[in-house]
Image (cartoon, rainbow, N blue to C red):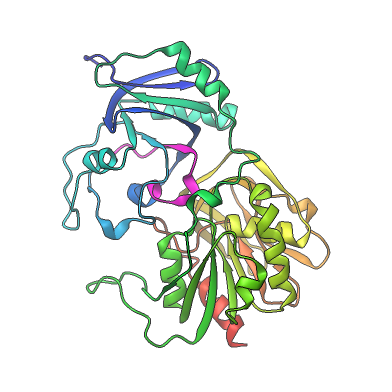
């Protein structure tokens, strides 16, 4: 680096990384994670599951395809900031409408380039997801001691309910289907099933996958009760992804899920929805060392022996050792053996830890939406 650093990342243990800032000037305090996806930085930054986190991208070329509103998974970036190896280059892509730096700046999000992201990723893996303070000052003036103290004072994500911060304010309907060349997004005009999707931080592509599978989708806020859900007389209920500690969100979501389970209708959950379904069934969740964040995670289906490459984004996991009788583990991570799926024996109730809607990532697991639709057909 031949110029004065304009960005600084302070870890709670006192480790300091310097770099070049881009996006919005300022500072933010968060948990630090790393994402190994080679594409989809815009989808990652707008994924509500990243609330309270700064994302380190292990892939070095971030920003080279610009951004487009079509790829937003939420109206605004949810991740607090991004750390990259190279400063964003001049973008080149026929779909782009804006460059990454301008997009971040207009949405008050901090970017930091010029960082040895391999070293930073090793630090995350070795010590767990650290608490950090990220600052960008065009003049390069930083109070290092103050930044380290702010990182140390950060309460972390354990015990925090963040779903309320990212859920929708009121219910709405959804009929947009998945993007397909050359027409773009479509519209579901002949749905077969009425589905209620409970929004704990739902990505738009999840709702598109439900619509593509033949569902007329009504989205309800995270705080919806079982009475709210069942009043719509759904054929099935979907529990979405989301951020934070499932045990904290579960304080109000678990009673709702139990009420839905009593109604004996198909239930499908992913990510946070998967974790809270497990809680409602009597299992427990635990905080992971550094979580799973990326689009290349191998997961084995224990029933078929098939291996899927999946997209993941979670810092908590279901403790498979606590699954009660009548609840079977269906999928496991081939990285660390952690739980990646459950089902209730003899009932159309199942969930997975990963993101079958991808965006970004492989589409190996789209069949789960069709399985949900088949359960409603039955």
Compared with 120, 257 (above or below) is below
Q: Quadrant of residue 372?
A: bottom right
- Magenta segment range? 44-61
Q: Position of residue 303 (x, y in %)?
A: 67, 68
Could you tell whether 178 is left or right of 20 in the image?
right
- Is residue 179 something that shows in the picture? yes
Compared with 270, 318 (above or below) is above
Could you tell whether 292 is left or right of 288 in the image?
left
Q: Position of residue 359 (x, y in %)?
A: 39, 58
Compared with 122, 362 (above or below) is below
Q: Position of residue 292 (x, y in %)?
A: 54, 45
Q: Residue at x 23, y 74 (%)?
A: 183
Report if residue 53 lies within the magenta region.
Answer: yes
| Tally of marks | 0
Front residue of 317 and 26: 26
- Is residue 39 something that shows in the picture? no
Q: Residue furthest right?
A: 325
Q: Quadrant of residue 119?
A: top left
Report if residue 18 lies within the magenta region.
Answer: no
Q: Residue at x 67, y 76 (%)?
A: 348
Q: Residue at x 54, y 80 (%)?
A: 373
Q: Assign the C terminus to one quadrant of the image.
A: bottom right
Front residue of 324 and 189: 189
Front residue of 129 and 30: 30
Q: Position of residue 282 (x, y in %)?
A: 79, 58
Q: Quadrant of residue 235?
A: bottom right
Q: Assign the N terminus to one quadrant of the image.
A: top left
């Amino acid at each position: 680096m031949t110029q004065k650093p304009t960005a600084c990342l302070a870890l709670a243990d006192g480790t300091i990384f310097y770099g070049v800032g881009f996006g919005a000037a300022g500072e933010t305090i968060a948990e630090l994670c790393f994402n190994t996806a080679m594409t989809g930085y815009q989808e990652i930054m707008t994924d509500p599951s990243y609330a309270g986190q700064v994302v380190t991208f292990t892939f070095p070329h971030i920003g080279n395809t610009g951004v487009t509103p079509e790829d937003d998974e939420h109206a605004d970036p949810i991740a607090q900031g991004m750390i990259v190896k190279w400063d964003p280059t001049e973008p080149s892509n026929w779909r782009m409408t804006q460059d990454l730096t301008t997009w971040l700046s207009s949405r008050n999000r901090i970017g930091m380039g010029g960082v040895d992201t391999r070293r930073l990723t090793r630090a995350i893996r070795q010590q767990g997801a650290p608490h950090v303070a990220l600052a960008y000052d065009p003049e390069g003036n930083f109070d290092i001691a103050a930044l380290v103290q702010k990182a140390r004072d950060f309460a972390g994500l354990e015990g925090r309910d963040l779903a309320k911060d990212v859920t929708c304010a009121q219910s709405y309907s959804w009929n947009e289907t998945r993007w397909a060349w050359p027409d773009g997004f479509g519209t579901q005009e002949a749905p077969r099933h009425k589905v209620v999707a409970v929004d704990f931080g739902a990505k738009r592509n999840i709702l598109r996958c439900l619509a593509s599978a033949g569902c007329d989708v009504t989205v309800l806020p995270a705080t919806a009760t079982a009475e709210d859900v069942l009043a719509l007389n759904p054929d099935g209920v979907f529990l979405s992804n989301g951020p934070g500690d499932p045990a904290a969100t579960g304080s109000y979501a678990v009673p709702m899920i139990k009420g839905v389970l009593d109604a004996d209708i198909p239930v499908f959950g992913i990510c946070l929805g998967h974790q809270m379904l497990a809680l409602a069934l009597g299992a427990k969740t635990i905080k992971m060392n550094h979580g799973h964040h990326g689009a290349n995670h191998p997961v084995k289906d224990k029933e078929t022996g098939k291996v899927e490459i999946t997209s993941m984004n979670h810092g908590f996991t279901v403790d498979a050792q606590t699954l009660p009788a009548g609840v079977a583990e269906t999928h496991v991570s081939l990285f660390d053996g952690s739980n990646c799926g459950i089902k209730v024996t003899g009932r159309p109730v199942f969930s997975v830890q990963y993101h079958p809607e991808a965006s970004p990532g492989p589409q190996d697991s789209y069949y789960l939406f069709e399985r949900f639709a088949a359960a409603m057909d039955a």
